Image (tube, grey):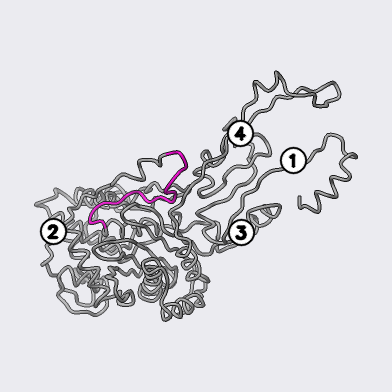
Amino acid sequence: LSSEEFCVFQEKLFRFPGFYVQRRSIRQYQSPYAALVLGDIGEVSPADVEEDEYYQNGDFIGKQGVERSYEKQLRGEKGIQILLRDARGRIKGRYMDGKLDTKTVPGKNLTLGLDLELQALGERLMEGKLGSIVAIEPSTGEVLCMVSSPTYDPRMMVGRQRGKNHLALSRNPLKPLLNRSIMGQYPPGSTFKTTQALTFLQEGIITPETAYPCYHGFIYRGLKVGCHGHAAPAKLVPAIGTSCNAYFCWGLYYMFGNRTKYKNVQEAMTVWKDYMVSMGFGYKLGIDLPGEKRGLIPNAPFYDKAYRGSWNGLTVISISIGQGEVNATPLQIANLGATIANRGYFITPHVVKQIQDEQIDTLYTRRRYTKVEARHYETVVQGMRRAVLAGTCRKANIPGIEVCGKTGTAQNRGHDHSVFMGFAPMNDPKIAIAVYVENGGWGADYGVPLGALMMEQYLNGKLSPESEKLAEMYQQRHIGYGTADR
């Protein structure tokens, strides 16, 4: 009830025996950002009451986001007061002078790793677009921003209008209640080529000096996987820099066909899959938010079933460039950037950095190493730096900051998705980022410039006047669903 409504009801309360007014504190959100990360609270369902004896009808519980995953820390403990009443129900005092009463224990404060200004900029840049921006601090695994677009103001979920607003959001065909950062499962496109380079290096399929031809694509036995024009044949560093499709197709073809190292294609596929899993793909990473999806990394039984046991490297060649059956969440792509920045390990991404009077789960402090040695990561880092200086990521060049990046143009039934994965600075990484803009076209169209603006904001604390103009331009660029305004 509003204050005005309460005053009117209080005057008439004597007419309604058995009714009373009870004060309740409600959640307040100080800014209009990060709704899907923070989540919201609402009344408990019958299932909640049945599942946990703590709750009674009318209680509130976290429904989404941090509110849900840290509900037990946030809710505190209820106090109990046992009162004496007479036959007319009038309170006559405390039972046993209050000896059996217990005090309430307030919920614990949580500190998030989110950078509010970075989150605000990300939500600005993604206006009128579908997709996600995720930034991670490589050294800690803390999520610096998690943008899912479209989004909404978390203050819509407070008060008497919550039900009405939630219903309207749930009926919106653009799904603003879907956290695309952890629930969207997309082809990672050419950002995935970095995982292939690392696998081929570790398995001895290639060295940094290995060069493969590219005749505007991978062409072999009637099969063609197209590629844009660039100097060829190319070694690994320039192949990453120019995002050569042919290079990584050849690498996968030679790995899956290597009968000296693997007895059959199934064994080669299993080895390949194990590398991908060690890099954080194919399974949930374990972020401290509800609803995370696992993406998809196919395995040998998957293809045995699909092709009745008759398949080879050419059959599945598109997985080498992040297409085909491979799917990943934007969080997993950002985590790949953090892993490369760390030269071979990551800490499970997490939103909450500190819990009052309590240690965070060791899952969020422990290093998780991949199957690839650190020395091979240095080669991939050089390739990503080459992409920014003279390759597909030139729009990510920030004066005074050594940015490493990798574009992705993920094929789609409509317009392609625009993807960027990168980190900076190169030798002292403070931020790793993934930008995924649905139907945004080439990676350099949206992914790269948006990623560069986000890194500049975080590393410099503000945007330059020129970058601010660029941010306003991209904020006003809207992409229709299924079409790209380029």
Q: Residue beneath label 1, please? A: 22
Residue bounds of the magenta highlight:
342-358
Residue that extends furthest to the left in the rendered view of this protein: 260
Q: Amino acid at mark 2?
A: Ile
In this rendered view, identify the residue nearer to me: 259 or 68: 68
Q: Earlier in the sequence, mark 3 or mark 4?
A: 4
- Which residue carries the number 4 mark? 104
**Is disc 3 placed on a helix, strand or loop?**
helix
Labels 1 and 4: the sequence-earlier one: 1
Residue to which mark 3 is pinned: 169
- Answer yes or no: is residue 303 visible: no
Kind of residue at disc 4: Thr
Left or right side of 15 for 25: left
What residue sits right under mark 2 in the picture?
Answer: 205
Question: Quadrant where the C terminus lies?
Answer: bottom left
Q: Is label 2 in a helix, a strand or a loop?
A: loop
Q: Looking at the picture, which amino acid does disc 1 mark?
A: Gln
Q: Which residue is at a point 64% across and 21% down the rendered structure image?
A: 100
